[in-house]
Image: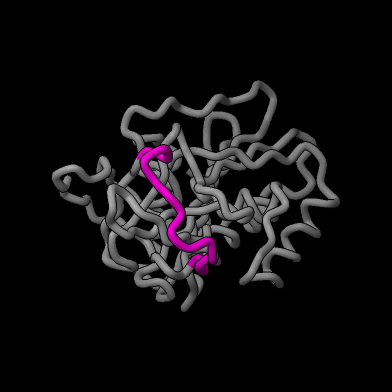
Amino acid sequence: MPWLKATLRGQVVLACASADGSFATFGGKVEIRYKPNDGRRYDALAKNLTVADPTLLPDETCGEADKPAAKKEGAATPTKGSSRGSAKAAASPPVHVEGALTVYTDGACTGNPGPAGLGVVVIEGAGRRELSEYLGEGTNNIAELTAIERALDMTHGRAEPVRIHTDSQYAIGVLSKGWKAKANRELIAGILDKLKVRRGIALVYVPGHAGVPLNERADELARLAIKTRQTREEAV
């Protein structure tokens, strides 16, 4: 997602934004950073934020934030997670639709850009197929998008509706909400071409690092690929 310079109680912060220049709110809160790429994130109430500069900053302004942030006096409420979305520990589990093929995807990178990997979990009856793929150098957004593309490839030819769960609001925005992409245009165009010829595909947002088991498993697979620098696909 892009970023905006905003003020929070008189202090300049970086706030997660939508493509139209508004704050990207989840449950009334906006993901913010006090410094770019410092590995710490906070959530602030949207009503407490004021746009300081309407210029949209690129997605890469702030990388992943996997480290928990200590709460500051008078500051926004910290959460543990990454720039991929709101990470509420009490988040409701996603609803699974009867008759639909359930898929979970995730992407990760060490540094942004840096070594990148993806994970895909496809539920098949009582079992599942898992993909852990090393992508080489890339960004978190590239990994998230490529994971969704792999999910489409892994479910190609299936008659059932497919619900692809992702914790990337960015990916959902550029693939299904008409957000204008400033980067990764060729990759996005290729995925959109695949979506155009498929019916019954739904991209479903799921909070990252919120204890949703299959989302956590997709994250594990993505990070395993980075750690081992290997790609593997297997039935479990």
Looking at the picture, does residue 48 appear above or below residue 140? above
Quarter of image, res 79:
top left
Question: Residue 222, how many percent across, how many down?
Answer: 43, 58
Q: In the rendered image, is residue 95 in sight?
A: yes
At x 75%, y 65%, the residue is 189
Does residue 42 appear to the left or right of 63 in the view shown?
left
- The secondary structure that most of the magenta stretch takes on is strand
Looking at the picture, does residue 232 appear above or below residue 236? below
Q: How is the image coloured?
A: one colour
Looking at the picture, does residue 188 appear above or below residue 111? above
In front: 223, or 64?
64
Q: In the rendered image, is residue 130 in sight?
A: no
At x 35%, y 35%, the residue is 88
In front: 58, or 198?
58
In front: 171, or 55?
55
Does residue 189 appear to the left or right of 207 in the view shown?
right
Question: Residue 109, how many percent across, how many down?
Answer: 40, 67
Query: Seen from this angle, which residue lies furthest top?
Result: 98
At x 61%, y 71%, the residue is 183
Q: Which residues are magenta?
A: 45-59
Does residue 184 appear to the left or right of 89 in the view shown?
right
How many marks the image carries: the answer is: 0
Question: Residue 227, how many percent across, how many down?
Answer: 33, 68
In the rendered structure, does residue 157 fall within the stretch colored magenta? no
In the rendered structure, does residue 47 fall within the stretch colored magenta? yes
At x 66%, y 64%, the residue is 181
